[in-house]
Amino acid sequence: MYYHDITKDDMKNGDGLRVVLWVSGCDHKCEGCQNPITWNPNDGIVFDEAAKEEIYMQLEKSYISGITFSGGDPLYPANREEVTALAKEIAKHFPEKTIWLYTGYYYEDVKHLEIMKYIDVLVDGPYEQEKRDDKLHWCGSTNQHVIYLKRNN
């Protein structure tokens, strides 16, 4: 898996101060996407132990609320196994931290995936530029949903 950035002390991609992993790979290619650079699954930086350690160092800070997976799309098929393993590991090591995930897929299409056991909040649906609404909290277009899931790991 490749990624483009690890953002620290982020307040725009979930509740509280968060660390955000911006993964590479997206088939949705939404018009008006804020991150088209992340569409290519083979572009960016290889996600390795050093990247994981960087995330863990952030999550160890008491003022960090949790991690957000974004991109690209963390549920891009080639990312699913590695993102699921990372979410599972984070949920186990940092049970007090929340896990958010942004995806262009609708919940109904991905609710069966193992990763849903480790997600606290899912923001679903492709960005639709014609449905953009700047008043929305945590998402950009009215077709998207902020879904509070009960993590049951």
Image (spheres, grey):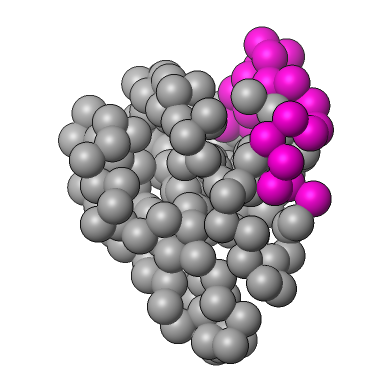
Measuring 58% from the left and 88% from the top, which residue is drawn there?
130
* Magenta span: 37-59
Measuring 73% from the left and 65% from the top, which residue is drawn there?
34
Q: Quadrant of residue 54?
A: top right
Whether residue 116 is situated above or below residue 45 in the rendered picture: below
Choose between 23 and 25: the one closer to the eye.
25
Whether residue 130 is situated above or below residue 21 in the rendered picture: below
Total residue callouts: 0
Quadrant the N terminus occupies: top right
Measuring 41% from the left and 43% from the top, which residue is drawn there?
98
Estimate the x, y position of residue 82 in percent, counting from the top left.
50, 22
Estimate the x, y position of residue 64 in percent, counting from the top left.
57, 42
Measuring 25% from the left and 57% from the top, which residue is drawn there?
108
Choose between 26 and 118: the one closer to the eye.
26
Q: Is residue 43 left or right of residue 54?
A: right
Estimate the x, y position of residue 60 in percent, counting from the top left.
57, 27
Quadrant the C terminus occupies: top left
Q: Quadrant of residue 125?
A: bottom left
Choose between 6 and 40: the one closer to the eye.
40
